[in-house]
Amino acid sequence: MSPRPRSSESAVIRATLDLIAEHGVTAVTVDAVADRSGVSRPTIYRRWGSRDSLIRAAYARMLRSLVEMDTGSVRGDLLALLRQLVAYLNRVRVFPSLMEAAARDPELAAMSEQAERRTRAIYERVLRRGVERGELPAGVDVLLFTELVVSPFVYRRVVSRDEIDPASIEPVVDAVLAAFGRIPARPRQQDVHTV
């Protein structure tokens, strides 16, 4: 592919994402994208075929997989994953609008669900390693743990629409790890002293 078409494609996707970020998905029309990107309507229709296909292509471009790493501890792994998540959420201004659109569009919803499954699998592997190393109890609820550690950041970005302070990552990880830490053995009755 020559540099010109690739540059036109990037300009169209960028214009689509900018329009979604500024005005929501309903503001995206092929005319508006053509005006914003400087790429002609016929070129856009030839490449994407319809407004909906263009929105889905922009959404697919926005979805990024986390890079999984093994730092040697469950805490280190979680910090690494959440730093990526927070940087992504702070950078991608269209995230709230596209989440709203995915609630109404089955194809966007399917794309979102697939990305969520990939992300959940990464967290599951991290937590399983934590169990194997004795950092977490064997019966840890992986889904609940993942929801608790990720939700504060998605809430801040999607519901509050606030920029996320990366300094908030460590306190969240530490609080969730404390809640799910190794379950201490219960003291035997004769070890319990009453005053």
Image: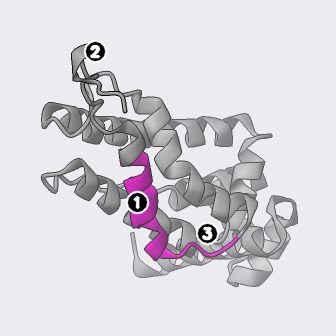
- Relative horizontal placement of residue 65, taking residue 25 as reference (left or right): left
Q: Please identify the quadrant where the C terminus is shown.
A: top left
What residue span does the magenta drawing correspond to?
162-177
Q: Residue furthest top?
A: 189
Res 32 → quadrant: bottom right
Please give the label number shown on residue 189: 2
In this view, the residue in front, 163 or 116, is: 163
User: What amino acid does circle 3 point to?
Assistant: Ile
- 142 horizontally vs 48: left or right: left
At horizontal 69% and vertical 59% (from top left) the residue drawn is 158
Q: Residue at x 71, y 44 (%)?
A: 102
Considering the numbered disc 1 on the image, is that residue within a helix, a strand or a loop?
helix
Q: Quadrant of residue 173?
A: bottom left
User: Within 10 Å of the Cα at label 3, are there few (<14), some (14-19), or many (20+) other Cα atoms?
Assistant: many
Check disc 3 and report the residue beneath it.
13
**Percent x, y of residue 90:** 56, 73
> What's the distance in space between the residues labelled 1 and 2, CA to CA?
42 Å
The local crowd at label 1, few if under 14, some if 14 to 19, many if 20 or more residues have their Cα within 10 Å, is many
Could you say which is closer to the camera, residue 55 or residue 124?
124
Q: Do the numbered discs 1 and 2 sit on residues whose CB atoms are within 8 Å?
A: no
- Residue assigned mark 1: 82
**What amino acid does circle 2 point to?**
Gln
